[in-house]
Amino acid sequence: MLFEGDITFHFGDESIAITGNTLLFFNPATPYSYEPLQPDTKGYFCVFKEEFFKESLRINLTDLPLFQPDAKPVYQLYGDSVTEIRSLFIKIKEEINSDYPYKYELIKSYVSELIYYALKLSPRKVKPRIADANSRITSVFMELLDRQFPIEALSHTFTCRTPADFADQLSIHVNYLNRALKKTTGKTTTEHITARWLAEAKALLRHTNWSIAEISQALGYEDQSHFSIFFKKQTQYSPSQFRNV
């Protein structure tokens, strides 16, 4: 999205103040919201699914720094770059409203330009990845994990909660899964699961008016006390303390 004005963006449990012309990207696995700080704030949104680019980009979107779960891709724009980026959003809007039979191919091209433009501004480099067995296992595991979020209803259910659940889905031994993740990411299966559950818990505490009991239920805890113990162990705060900080 492109925003013009003063806004505070909330990514999961973090907040970033932006001003002027700013280009932002969001990962659907990371809850976000924003607060305009002045009445004349304006901008453009472009929402798409990864499947939209399956045959267009030579790299998976999930491999890009822009779309990593921990990414904060916020780019301040100046001079000619403002005009260039704004023109791409205007072209996308015009094509959406047109009757041109190949308009979605054009839109893919324009959005690709936005992505590659941001990559030029990104301090992190995109490294080609060799699709070995460990990388494939890690990729599928991360997809299974991220697919379960964000939580949007109290009736939310989880297919996988434990390392054994994920290993069963992948038809491999849990130790094999753990070794693959450790080799490719430096983290164990439990560490990945814990981090994702914690991020979602923080987001729900920050961005919903659900009670702590309801959040505990939505996260799959049968007993609220178990959720409170988990949360305090990871953050040093109780859920209620964190919500009020």
Image (cartoon, rainbow, N blue to C red):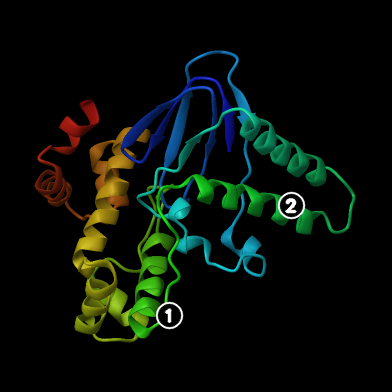
Name the mark on residue 194.
none
Question: What is the CA distance from the residue labelled 1 to the residue labelled 2?
Answer: 29 Å
Circle 1 is placed at which residue position?
Answer: 131
Q: Amino acid at mark 2?
A: Ile
The N terminus lies in quadrant: top right
User: 182 or 31: which is nearer to us?
Assistant: 182
Q: Find residue 138 and report its image quarter.
A: bottom left
* Rendered location of residue 33, percent (x, y): 45, 34
* Rendered location of residue 240, percent (x, y): 18, 32
Q: Is 205 located above or below residue 234 in the figure?
A: above
Q: Does dot 1 land on a helix, a strand or a loop?
A: loop
Q: Determine whether, in the image, residue 170 is placed left or right of residue 75.
A: left
Q: Is 3 located above or below residue 186 in the figure?
A: above
* Rendered location of residue 37, percent (x, y): 47, 16
Circle 2 is placed at which residue position?
Answer: 107
Q: Determine whether, in the image, residue 12 is placed left or right of residue 107.
A: left
Q: Is residue 208 visible?
A: no
Q: Residues within 10 Å of mark 1 (few under 14, many from 20)?
A: few
